[in-house]
Image (cartoon, rainbow, N blue to C red):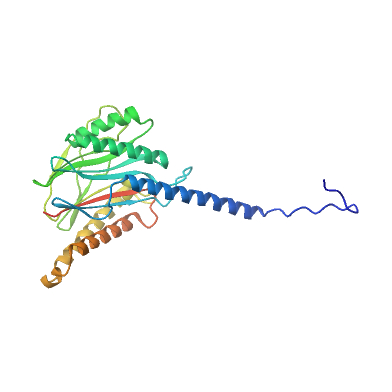
């Protein structure tokens, strides 16, 4: 017990400055959020297929990018969402390509993304058409994922015929770059997964040519709060043309110069151009996750 000395009040221990205490609490929250974001990013990277650099498959060279959001939605520990990609060779020799996005952020979205991606990968081994794959995946989302929606674009590329057959479920259509000119493919019918039972999922086909570049991406690449999505798509189209424009310029060098460029150097240069493309469109502080799958037809 503390008593009085000569009638004077005892000295009390100094109290913390409220501003300093608030600053410490904020730093602690940020540190925990950063730690969780690092853990979640590692978890997602371990789930997504690798490598994220160039990967040569028959008649194609494939590169992928997965860029996390820098801003964190209110109430979330991390801005990491359920964006994912897939590129795998099927038993019949065709390539299965897919990019998707599960609604939400944080650990629940990553968990759902993992299950959805694995389910689609398993279904793809049946050889069913992309439209049928999405119809089956929609049933799975409705029955097994409470209060969840997702978007997907997926397709089969046949290296022998260079025919791409694809379908989409509420997802941005791919961009095709041919001889330096970019256009967004016309999307077949398809609604968001988990929105309604038994919707139709149409199919589209396009025959690719040697030198073509196909870009499949999530909406985080083109959507921002401060601009219209049409503006984002226009920026992406111009940026896609610059990717191959640099490649065409490089191809115009003399034969002696071309012979000095190794395959590794060519792949590294393409990877660098993809990095610049993602940064120029999404900006240095992306508001949403971005997944990008780039497919170059080499033969």
Viewed as shown, does residue 2 lie left or right of 283? right
- On the question of residue 236 being in view, the answer is yes
Q: In which quarter of the image is residue 242?
A: bottom left
Q: Position of residue 57 (x, y in %)?
A: 17, 50
Could you tell me which residue is drawn at 32 percent across and 48 percent down?
229
- Residue positioned most to the right: 6
- On the question of residue 222 being in view, the answer is no
Q: Position of residue 147 (x, y in %)?
A: 38, 31
Could you tell me which residue is drawn at 60 percent across and 51 percent down?
22
Could you tell me which residue is drawn at 31 percent across and 36 percent down?
116
- Residue positioned most to the left: 161
On screen, residue 165 above or below 231: above
* Viewer-closest of 292 and 175: 292
Viewed as shown, does residue 275 lie left or right of 28? left
On screen, residue 131 above or below 287: above
Look at the image and tell me in which quarter the C terminus lies: bottom left
Please state the total of marks drawn on the protein image. Answer: 0
* Viewer-closest of 248 and 294: 294
Q: Position of residue 101 (x, y in %)?
A: 32, 42
On screen, residue 189 above or below 181: above
Q: Quadrant of residue 262?
A: bottom left
Look at the image and tell me in which quarter the N terminus lies: top right
Q: In which quarter of the image is residue 145?
A: top left
Q: Where is residue 180 in the image (x, y as percent from the top left)?
A: 17, 58
């Amino acid at each position: 017990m503390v008593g009085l000395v000569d009638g004077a009040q005892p000295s009390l221990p100094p109290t913390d400055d409220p501003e300093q205490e608030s600053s410490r609490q904020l730093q602690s929250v940020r540190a925990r959020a950063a730690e969780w974001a690092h853990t979640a990013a590692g978890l997602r990277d371990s789930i997504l297929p690798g490598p994220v650099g160039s990967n040569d498959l028959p008649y194609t060279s494939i590169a992928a990018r997965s860029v996390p959001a820098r801003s964190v939605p209110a109430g979330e520990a991390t801005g990491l969402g359920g964006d994912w990609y897939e590129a795998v060779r099927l038993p019949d020799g065709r390539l299965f390509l897919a990019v998707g996005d599960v609604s939400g952020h944080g650990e629940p979205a990553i968990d759902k993304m993992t299950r959805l991606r694995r389910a689609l990968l398993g279904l793809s081994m049946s050889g069913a058409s992309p439209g049928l794959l999405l119809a089956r995946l929609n049933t799975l989302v409705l029955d097994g994922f409470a209060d969840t929606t997702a978007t997907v674009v997926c397709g089969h590329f046949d290296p022998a015929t260079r025919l791409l057959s694809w379908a989409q479920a509420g997802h941005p259509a791919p961009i095709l770059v041919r001889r330096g000119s970019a256009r967004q493919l016309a999307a077949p019918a398809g609604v968001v997964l988990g929105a309604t039972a038994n919707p139709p999922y149409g199919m589209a086909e396009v025959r690719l040519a040697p030198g073509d570049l196909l870009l499949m991406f999530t909406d985080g690449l083109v959507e921002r709060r401060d601009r219209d999505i049409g503006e984002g798509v226009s920026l992406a189209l111009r940026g896609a043309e610059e990717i191959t424009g640099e490649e065409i310029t490089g191809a115009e060098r003399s034969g002696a110069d071309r012979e000095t460029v190794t395959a590794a150097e060519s792949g590294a240069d393409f990877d660098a151009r993809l990095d610049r493309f993602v940064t120029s469109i999404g900006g240095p502080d992306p508001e949403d996750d971005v997944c990008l799958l780039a497919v170059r037809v080499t033969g």
